[in-house]
Amino acid sequence: MSTAIENSIITDLKLAPQGKLKIDWVAQHMPLLNTLKEEFERELPFKGKKVVICLHLEAKTAYLALVVKAGGADVTVCASNVLSTQDDVVAALVDAGVTAFAKYGASEEEYHLHINKALDTNPDIIIDDGGDLVSTLHSDPARAEQLKNIQGGCEETTTGILRLKALANEGNLKFPMVAVNDAFCKYLFDNRYGTGQSVWDGIMRTTNLVVAGKTAVIVGYGWCGKGCAMRAKGLGARVIVTEIDPIKAVEAIMDGHEVMPIVEAAKHGDFYITVTGNKDCITREAFEVMKDGAILCNAGHFDVEISKPDLNALAVQTREVRRNIQEYTFADNRRVFLLAEGRLVNLAAGDGHPAEVMDMTFALQALGLRWISENGRSMEPNVYSVPAEMDRYVAELRLKTWNVGIDKLSDEQARYLNSWAE
């Protein structure tokens, strides 16, 4: 029996064959990771290194873990969300020699146990999603010595980067972290096109309801909100955006959407999608004026954007009416429906972003991890941007896989532009 099988905590290793099929499918549609896998197999950039990856454990993430393993790493994975874990995919990883601590529907206690078990492997480098690995390392006094041994890592999300920057601003961040989410090849494509498509995939798969002719309220108009609004419009919905930033509100109007406060929007919406990264974006005041049958879901990292305490306080009855749909009936017999417990609807009730989109993001993760592996010891503890040349390299790889060429500056054009910079 392999070490990975002996040490892992998973649901059932017998699920591995169907998980492998899922991984094989996405691998066929992730040419950038395929290119890096071949490169890593030749160069072994992670030879002798222990890597812990805390991400949504579905097929695309699994393939990233296998690419890192191909680079010589001893890889351990744990889940960043208890409802996005796919047990068959986790089993396939363990069968392939990756240690895993993850189960679908794990309790809060199990979730933290799994994170701690992963950290007990004493990683050299990490990939985090939402900052829970980093937070656990920094908040547990028993891990003070372990902090000194970690070279650094990469962070996947806006929420995680906010937490990292707060630590760094306080002078408490103990190792360098790469803000992968802030790279152009991440947020312009993953956050916009990935979130836009996968959120509506999750909603439509879960509800089996039509979108055309209905009103979608998008709470927050960052890159994820833009993607959700764009896809809602394409599906034939009327789109209302709520915002706190006047600049983003102007942008939403010029993109062809309506803008109004959430309490006003709540009178019109059929679908509600929160994408802010903040708490209490939809609360009692909005619930009290919503239509009967309104559907609520969240695409931000944590399940705090839609106030579940307020929903429970208003409800006289609750029941699960379909998988991942909780019905809340109010005293006046109006009903609202919360998808996936208010967790990430695209992952908790779907398969997450399309493979081709995550190919770019995970190429950045793999390259960022190699950069930290090679340079982390000489870098000050801080939050670092993805190097511009790495960002461009991923875009160039993407164009190459599409067999698309672009123009280049002539020497004279380059000299002309440089003269303006002098």
Image: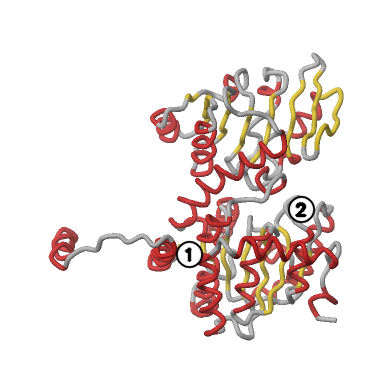
Measure how far apart labels 2 and 1 are at the Cα level: 29 Å
At horizontal 63% and vertical 69% (from top left) the residue drawn is: 126
Q: Which residue is mark 2?
A: 82
In the rendering, which numbered label is found on residue 145? none
**Is 125 on the left or on the right of 337, as rendered?**
left
Up the image or down, 217 lies above or below 299; here it is above
Q: Position of residue 65 (x, y in %)?
A: 65, 69
For label 2, the SS is loop
Residue picked out by circle 1: 384
Does label 2 or label 1 sit earlier along the sequence? 2
Q: Amino acid at mark 1?
A: Tyr
Residue 22: image location, x then y, percent? 69, 60
Name the image quarter holding residue 56: bottom right
Task: Give the amino acid type for the residue marked by disc 2 in the picture.
Answer: Val
Quadrant (top left, top right, bottom left, bottom right) of the N terminus: bottom right
Instruction: Please state the horizontal and vertical placement of residue 148, each as a whole percent of the image.
Output: 63, 77
Q: Nearer the viewer, residue 37 or 191?
A: 37
Image depth: mark 2 or mark 1 in front: 2
Q: Is residue 110 left or right of residue 166?
A: right
- Between 361 and 36, the one lying in front of the other is 36
User: Height in image: 290 above or below 280?
Assistant: above
- Residue 315 figure quarter: top right
Colour theme: secondary structure
Would you place residue 407 above or below residue 303 in this image?
below
Q: Are marks 2 and 1 in contact (CB under 8 Å)?
A: no
Q: Secondary structure at mark 1?
A: strand
Residue occupying the point 42% across, 63% down: 391
What percent of the width, then of the height, locates residue 185? 45, 57
140 above or below 264?
Answer: below
